[in-house]
Image (cartoon, helix red, strand yellow):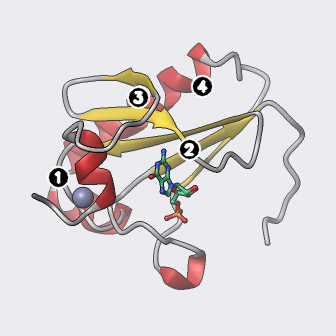
Amino acid sequence: MSECLFCRIAAGEIPATLVAENDQAIAFQDVNPQAPVHVLVIPRAHHSDVSEMVAADPLLAGQVLALAAEVAEQEGLADGYRLVFNTGAKAGQSVFHAHAHVMGGRDLTWPPG
Ligand code: 5GP
Ligand code: ZN
């Protein structure tokens, strides 16, 4: 059994609220939402962060982005949303399985903290 939390969610071993999926990626609700819409999009395969995923499998990265855009449309975020890959502990990454945060449904300030 994998020790990676998001691999376990992808395998169905830990429950999550699924929002969308494609062959290579899944999208589910963040357990601690920071906006009215806060969905995580992950590759089914394990990659530690977005840089490692792009280097190892750029087509997979495209699948993750495609699903993120689909989630934004499905969740009614046509007027604006933020797509964030926290990469490395210094940037706030806490789960080391690549994931995009799709956030929206409120005004989002810039720059982020
Ligand atoms: P990071 O800080 O790595 O960019 O983002 C990790 C995200 O995963 C956080 O927003 C956190 O709320 C979310 N998260 C952590 N554990 C779980 C979990 O067990 N289930 C779900 N759905 N989200 C989680
Ligand atoms: Zn993993």
Numbered tag placed on residue 30 in the rendering: 2
Estimate how packed mark 1 is, as few (under 14), some (14 to 19) or many (20 or more) residues with alpha carbons within 10 Å.
few
Q: Is residue 78 left or right of residue 60?
A: right
Q: Residue at x 56, y 85 (%)?
A: 90
Does any atom of ligand 1 lie closer than 8 Å to the CB of label 2?
A: yes
Reading the chain from its start, which is encountered first: label 2 or label 4?
Answer: 2
Image location (x, y in percent) of residue 93 = 50, 71
Find the distance from the CA under tag 4 to the CA under tag 1. 23 Å
Closer to the eye: label 3 or 1 = 3
Q: What quarter of the picture does the N terminus occupy?
A: bottom left
Under mark 1, the amino acid is: Asp
Find the distance from the CA under tag 3 to the CA under tag 1. 16 Å
Task: State yes or no: discs 4 and 3 in contact (Cβ < 8 Å).
Answer: no
Task: Please state the total of marks drawn on the protein image.
Answer: 4
Under mark 3, the amino acid is: Leu
Q: Residue at x 35, y 45 (%)?
A: 42
Q: Is residue 44 left or right of residue 78?
A: left
- Element assignment for label 3: helix
Q: Residue at x 23, y 52 (%)?
A: 7
Under mark 2, the amino acid is: Asp
Reading the chain from its start, which is encountered first: label 4 or label 1?
Answer: 1
Numbered tag placed on residue 57 in the rendering: 1
Choose top left, top right, bottom left or bottom right for residue 106: top right
Numbered tag placed on residue 67 in the rendering: 3
Task: State yes or no: discs 2 and 3 in contact (Cβ < 8 Å).
Answer: no
Q: Taking the image as four quarters, which one is ligand 2 found in?
A: bottom left
Q: Is residue 6 left or right of residue 7?
A: right
